[in-house]
Image: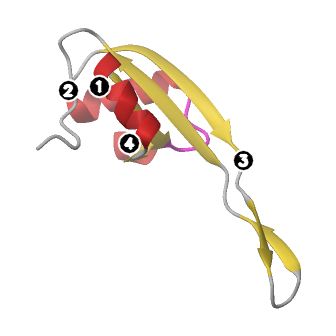
């Protein structure tokens, strides 16, 4: 089994992720090779909550142009996980 901190890389900070917090849905950037059961186990181990559902999303890295050499490169691909918690559970990420 992988270490939980190797599966969950960081939380995603965006307007969409903040809007989903009201529905108990938290967004994380995860390892590209992580599966849904691994993500569920990692979130439950790190934050001591009960996970109801996990949805994953693979995003391709953006293509970027170098003006000096007129060549192209790309940013790395990213995998996101939308984790839904059961009613009553929450993760204290950004609350003051």
Q: Nearer the viewer, mark 4 or mark 3?
A: 3
Q: Residue under circle 1?
A: 44
Q: In what element is the residue under mark 2?
A: loop
* CA–CA distance in space, label 3 to label 1: 27 Å
Q: Nearer the viewer, mark 3 or mark 1?
A: 3
Q: In what element is the residue under mark 3?
A: loop
Q: Earlier in the sequence, mark 3 or mark 1?
A: 1
Local packing at callout 3 (Cα closer than 10 Å; few below 14, some 14-19, many 20+) is few
Q: Are marks 1 and 2 in contact (CB under 8 Å)?
A: yes
Work out which quarter of the rendered image holds the C terminus and state it: top left
Q: Earlier in the sequence, mark 2 or mark 3?
A: 2
Residue 3's mark?
A: 4
Residue drawn 53% across and 22% down?
A: 55
Read off the magenta span.
30-35
Residue 2 appears in view:
no
Q: Nearer the viewer, mark 4 or mark 1?
A: 1
* CA–CA distance in space, label 2 to label 3: 31 Å
Residue drawn 66% across and 37% down?
A: 58
**Front one among 86 and 34:** 86
Q: In what element is the residue under mark 4?
A: loop
Q: Main secondary structure of the magenta part?
A: loop
* CA–CA distance in space, label 4 to label 1: 12 Å
Residue 48's mark?
A: 2
Q: Residue under circle 3?
A: 60
Residue 82 place in picture, x, y as percent: 47, 27
């Amino acid at each position: 089994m992988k270490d939980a901190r190797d599966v969950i890389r960081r939380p995603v900070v965006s307007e969409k992720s903040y809007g989903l917090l009201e529905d108990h849905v938290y967004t994380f950037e995860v390892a590209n090779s992580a599966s849904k059961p691994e993500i569920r186990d990692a979130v439950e181990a790190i934050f001591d909550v009960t996970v109801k559902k996990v949805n994953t999303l693979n995003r391709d890295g953006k293509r970027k142009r170098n003006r000096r050499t007129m060549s192209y490169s790309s940013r790395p691909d990213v995998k996101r996980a939308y984790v839904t918690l059961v009613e009553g559970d929450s993760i204290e990420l950004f609350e003051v």
